[in-house]
Image (cartoon, coloured by chain):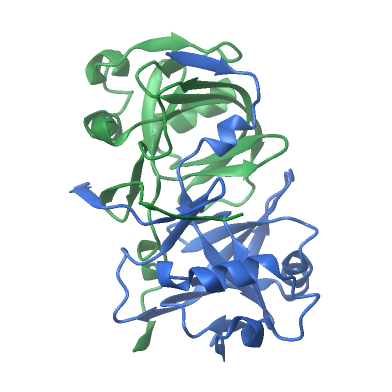
Chain colours: A green, B blue
Amino acid sequence: MKELVAELSKGIWTLPPFPVVLVTVDRNIMTAGAFHFYSFKPPSVMVGIIPKKYTYELINRENEFGINIPTMEQIALVRTCGSVSGRDVDDKYSKAGVTPFRGTKIKSYLIKECPVNLECVVVHKVGFTGTHQWFVGEIQAVHVDDTYTRDQPLMFWSGEYRKVGEFLEKAW
Amino acid sequence: MKELVAELSKGIWTLPPFPVVLVTVDRNIMTAGAFHFYSFKPPSVMVGIIPKKYTYELINRENEFGINIPTMEQIALVRTCGSVSGRDVDDKYSKAGVTPFRGTKIKSYLIKECPVNLECVVVHKVGFTGTHQWFVGEIQAVHVDDTYTRDQPLMFWSGEYRKVGEFLEKAW
């Protein structure tokens, strides 16, 4: 039986899971559940940041960000980066036990242990703000580990970490 | 071994899967792989539409859209709505074998057989266009089937349909 739900935010919490990523700016790392591709051409992605977060300040200052895709084995890393603010620790890479490497096209660091890293430059700040400010970043460089498969990433939504789901069918 | 990839669009294709949704405007249905929540408050979502699509014309005209979440059993429906343009068929609901019902807060129809339906009014057209035009829609009404669980939706990316992944851990 279908019901009309009174609480509109249920429309958000009821959604399927989304990829979880680690956003790196300067020497900081933040866990983000608000991430999507934006456009095929120019190849670009977008990330939604709550304005009180330290990363919001950093992206506005640096105008760039790194997207690091963690695997489901890196759930502890994801939790650490999502629970401690870069305002309160000297070096989140040390805190989380991961290795920084410098971008080739951006100044910010990226996470060596994540199998995919995207170096992005901000090309647009979306002009409608709710709880999140969305930033569109054009991809400037892509690093992929040769053992990476699309079965490895970690998904998240509505308080639940999940695996990437089983393959069903090819689309074309 | 991590490699710097020459083809930047690989940064898009290498991403984890995203939810696939059916976007309904007026009496038309379109399959969309470009969908995300936008903001918790106001509760809003966003959808990216390729401008040559019929739905692009319809959203611009009606300033509203429905989001219908299909289950993995509805993959044939998703394929049909993704392969036929509403410009070329009289009624996509009949073509796809599903039942339209009118929104309570929008004029557009929604799909009865999908377990979740969101009625949305466009509040923002994102001002940077690549291959997709993103529309932000504020949720006006939410319909949820009482048998729906977050294990049922269908995921998609990079030419692959997938199930929602297995639950790993609670986040908090």
Residue B106 makes an appearance in the image:
no
> Looking at the image, which is closer to me, A63 or A23?
A23
**x and y percent of residue A53 in the render?**
39, 35
How many numbered marks does the figure carry? 0
**Residue found 62% across the figure and 75% down from its top:** B24
Pick the residue in front: A56 or B85: B85
- Residue B21, given in percent of the width and then of the height, sits at 53, 65
Who's the residue at 46% across and 26% down the image?
A116
Pick whichever, A82 or B69, lies toward us.
B69
State the residue in front, A130 or B28.
B28
Which quarter shows the N terminus of chain A?
A: bottom left
Vertical arrangement, residue A88 with respect to residue A6, above or below? above
Quarter holding the C terminus of chain A is bottom right
Residue B15 visible in the displayed image = yes
A52 is higher (above) or lower (below) than A54: below
Tell me: residue B48, above or below residue B80: above
Res A158 → quadrant:
bottom left
Please state the horizontal and vertical placement of residue A94, each as a whole percent of the image.
26, 13
With B125 as the anchor, is B66 left or right in this view?
left
User: Relative to B30, does residue B103 appear above or below in the rendering?
Assistant: below
Residue A77 shown left or right of residue A165 in the figure: left
Residue B127, percent across and down?
Answer: 72, 47
